[in-house]
Image (spheres, rainbow, N blue to C red):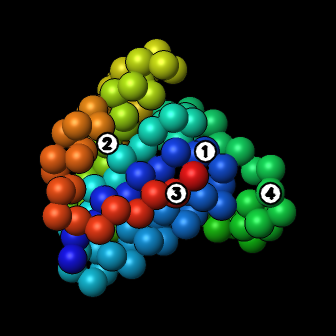
Amino acid sequence: MDAGIIVGSNEYSSLMYAAIVAGMRTSMGDNVIMFITMDGALAFLKNPVVKKTTDTSRKMDEEGQDFRKFLKEAKESGLLKMYVCYFAAELHKLHKKDLDDMIDDIWGITKFSIETESSQIISIW
């Protein structure tokens, strides 16, 4: 079953969980659409803003865990597409040129909802 992952946080542990789920699902052959909204959009800037306020986030950082590595591997499969939320982009005054190359485009929630209509939705905040 295909999946839609909604990421609404720029906390490192949340980003890592989203990346692990995306990697696991694509490795099983599922198409995954990641919809990055609210503060999550800040983690996908060319100069990302990622919070490490939890013990888990700090420990993963100290151990050299890298959520981007998992996402890049999933993207290489061709099964992961990543979109920043239009509302979040407007809120933070972001344009496609400001975003990491992993991001495919900026979408509205309606487009995401239509494209993931028959998918399992996983929400990570």
Residue shown at 48% from the left, 71% from the top: 20
Which of the two labelled residues, at mark 1 and mark 2, occupies the earlier sequence position? 1
Mark 4 secondary-structure assignment: loop
With 12 as the anchor, is 105 left or right in this view? left
Please provide percent x and percent y for residue 27: 30, 80
Residue position for label 2:
83
Instruction: Using the image as rendered, state which of residue 65 and residue 23 is in the foreground.
Output: 23
Disc 3 versus disc 1: distance between alpha carbons? Answer: 10 Å
Question: Which of the 4 image quarters holds residue 96?
Answer: top left
Residue shown at 66% from the left, 61% from the top: 13
Q: Residue 54 carries which label?
A: 4
Tell me whether circle 3 and circle 1 mark residues in contact (CB < 8 Å): no
Count numbered badges in the picture: 4
Compared to 46, does 92 lie above or below?
above
Disc 2 versus disc 4: distance between alpha carbons? Answer: 26 Å
In the current view of this chain or complex, which residue is farthest to the right? Answer: 55
Mark 2 secondary-structure assignment: strand
Mark 1 secondary-structure assignment: loop
Question: For mark 2, does the 10 Å Cα neighbourhood hold few (<14), some (14 to 19), or many (20 or more) residues?
Answer: many
Question: For mark 3, does the 10 Å Cα neighbourhood hold few (<14), some (14 to 19), or many (20 or more) residues?
Answer: some
Residue position for label 3:
124
